[in-house]
Image (spheres, rainbow, N blue to C red):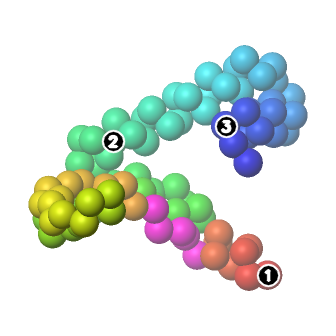
Amino acid sequence: MNKADLTEALAAEAGIPKVHAARYIHILTNTIANALVGGDKVTISDFGTFTVSQRRNFKGYNPRNGTQIDVPARRIPVFRAGKALKESLNA
């Protein structure tokens, strides 16, 4: 399922035009992204939690020529599924 499919599903479920559904999805994703950039944790009850994790730097290899490269430390987004979501997947 991609963003267009999600927009169609939301519009059908809520009985709203696709334009409004697309706008709501855009607002939701931007709000989550802005919170993560600001260092906040986003928890949606019964669905899951979005957090930011710090990856350490490490030595990697360039697959084209096999030379060793330094991969810098970076922050990455992490999603941890909530209990209700996990249970619905295994029901």
Q: In the displayed structure, does residue 30 sit left or right of residue 25?
A: left
**Which residue is at a point 33% across and 62% down the rendered structure image?**
63
The residues bearing labels 1 and 3 have C-alpha atoms spaced at a distance of 26 Å
* One can see residue 84 in this view: yes
Which of pointers 3 and 2 indicates the residue nearer the eye? 3
Does dot 1 land on a helix, a strand or a loop?
Answer: loop
Residue 52 in view of the camera: no
Secondary structure category for the residue under label 3: helix
7 w.r.t. 73: above or below: above
Q: Amino acid at mark 2?
A: Ala
Give above or below for 51 relative to 86. above
Q: Quadrant of residue 49?
A: bottom left
Packing grade of label 1 (10 A; few <14, some 14-19, many >=20) is few
Q: Residue 18's mark? A: none
Numbered label attached to residue 3: 3
Task: Classify 10 Å Cα crowding around label 3: few (below 14), some (14-19), many (20 and above).
Answer: few
Gap in Å between the C-alphas at discs 3 and 2? 20 Å
Based on the picture, tell me whether residue 82 belongs to the magenta stretch: yes
On the image, the x and y values in percent for residue 48 come to 52, 63
* Picture coordinates of residue 41, whole percent (x, y): 33, 54
* Residue 35 badge: 2
Q: Position of residue 89 (x, y in %)?
A: 72, 75
Identify the mark nearer the N-term, 2 or 1.
Answer: 2
**The residue stretch that appears in magenta:** 79-83
The residue that disc 1 covers is 91
Give the dominant element type of the magenta stretch: helix, strand or loop.
Answer: strand
Type of residue at label 3? Lys
Pick the residue in front: 64 or 88: 64
The reply to whether dot 2 and dot 1 touch (C-beta < 8 Å) is: no
